[in-house]
Image (cartoon, rainbow, N blue to C red):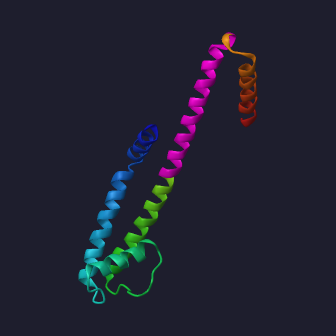
Amino acid sequence: MRRLQILRRVLRETGAYSIWSGFLIQFFISAAVIWLREPEIHRYGDALWYCYAVVTTIGFGDVVAQHFLSRLLSVLLSISAALVIALVTGVVVNYFNQITALRQKDSLMALMDKLERLPELPREELEQIALRAKQFSNQK
């Protein structure tokens, strides 16, 4: 549950929801305009396929934009796609960094709890704590 909360916080803080939804709106509107403008594109599904080829930078070449507006929309769509992909990468990295920090914090809290009960702990557990402290100091 904590991971889901972290993911929601990361998505909210980065503005990923609004950027992603704006990109999808741009994608479908661009497909509609290109469908209406390009003589080689006869169905909306073909326009979506063309936009997919633009977004993924595959550029199959089965359809090439001929009108200025279609070319302009293709360029803007490819730039937006690159930015959205960069955003997704950043969000994923941020999410995993926060998960790692959360694990470290939990581990440190467990160690602090044991240190508070130090006089009560058996010798084996004291040795484990000392070993973990050495490992932690070697990581820094």
- Percent across and percent down for residue 96 are 54, 46
Question: In the figure, residue 27 lies in which quadrant?
Answer: bottom left
Q: Quadrant of residue 37?
A: bottom left
In this rendering, would 131 be left or right of 15?
right
Above-or-below relation of 73 to 63: above
Q: Above or below — where is 89 with respect to 67? A: above
User: Which of the pair 85/67 is nearer the observer?
Assistant: 85
Instruction: Give the residue drawn at x 36%, y 56%.
Output: 19
Measuring from the top left, give residue 131's x and y in whole percent: 75, 28
Which picture quadrant has residue 31?
Answer: bottom left
Q: Which sits in the foreground, 81 or 133?
A: 133
Q: On the rendered image, what quadrant is the N terminus found in?
A: top left
Residue 69, can we see it? no
Near-viewer residue (38 or 135): 135
Answer with left or right where residue 45 lies relative to residue 60. Answer: left
Q: Residue furthest left?
A: 36
Dividing the image into 4 quarters, which one contains the C terminus?
A: top right
Q: Position of residue 7 (x, y in %)?
A: 43, 44
Residue in the picture at 29% in, 64% down: 25
Answer whether residue 80 is visible to the viewer in this image: yes
Q: Main secondary structure of the magenta part?
A: helix
**Which residue range is magenta in the image?**
91-119
- Judge whether residue 112 is colored magenta: yes
Up-down relation of residue 85 to residue 119 (above or below): below
Considering every residue shown, the one lying at the far top of the view is 119
Q: Residue at x 75, y 17 (%)?
A: 123
